Amino acid sequence: MKKIAVYPGSFDPITNGHIDIITRGLRMFDELIILVAYNPNKSSLFTVEERMDLIREVVIKDQKILRVDCSAGLLVDYVQSKGANVILRGLRAVSDFEYEFQMALINRRLNRDIETVFLMTGYQWFYTSSNLIKEAAGLGGSVKGLVPDIVFERLQDKFNHIKN
Ligand code: PNS
């Protein structure tokens, strides 16, 4: 049976930390679906389409076993609808743990057939988060090297005073 995993997140925008998890996740599963899980009532810097396009630009090339999708619904329902049974998440600093633990437990309660699998984020991305990157870029700080070049350019388009 094919091992299909779903890697959900806001990806607003995708960072090098996410790419690290995707690259390593691809070695573990037969198929990986990157899911932009969005809440229509929550504001974001990039639209869902922009986020999906950026993901496709930076990771989908040559990857036949990778798909990019979006959903505003319940994660476990999406996972089941795709014939998958694994939710893949990256774990960074200790501060992530409580939130991730809660999410894994609620998802397990909602659907016992689905397991959450965590990968420890590579140490160089330990403190990289989309939120911090957006905040730093919005205040003009350079976030080069923390995100793929194309994402950096899109951030420059959004915040035109961002340093190189
Ligand atoms: O990148 P993020 O913002 O940490 O990702 C959080 C995300 C999108 C994975 C989480 O909010 C989620 O699973 N949303 C889907 C809605 C859902 O199923 N919620 C109940 C379980 S938490």
Image (cartoon, grey):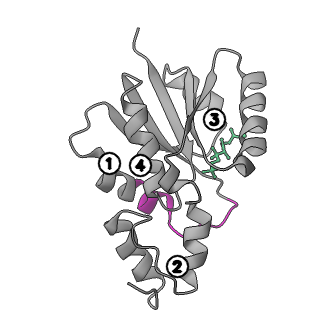
Earlier-in-chain disc, 1 versus 4: 4
Could you tell which of marks 3 and 2 lies nearer the N-terminus? 3
Label 1 sits on what residue type?
Answer: Val
| Disc 3 residue crowd, few under 14, some 14–19, many 20+, Cα 10 Å | some
Decide: few, some or many residues near mark 1? Use Cα within 10 Å; few <14, some 14-19, many ≥20.
some
Q: What residue sits 55% from the left and 24% below the top?
A: 86
Callout 3 amino acid: Leu
Q: Which mark is residue 19?
A: 4
Label 2 residue SS: helix
Camera-side mark, 1 or 4: 4
Q: Which residue is label 3 attached to?
A: 75
Q: Is mark 3 within 8 Å of ligand 1?
A: yes
- Residue underneath mark 2: 137
Compared across the picture, whether 136 is left or right of 148 comes to: right
Residue 51 within the segment the image draws in magenta? yes
Please name the residue that numbered disc 1 is placed on.
Answer: 59
| Disc 4 residue: CB within 8 Å of ligand 1 | no
Q: Amino acid at mark 2?
A: Ala
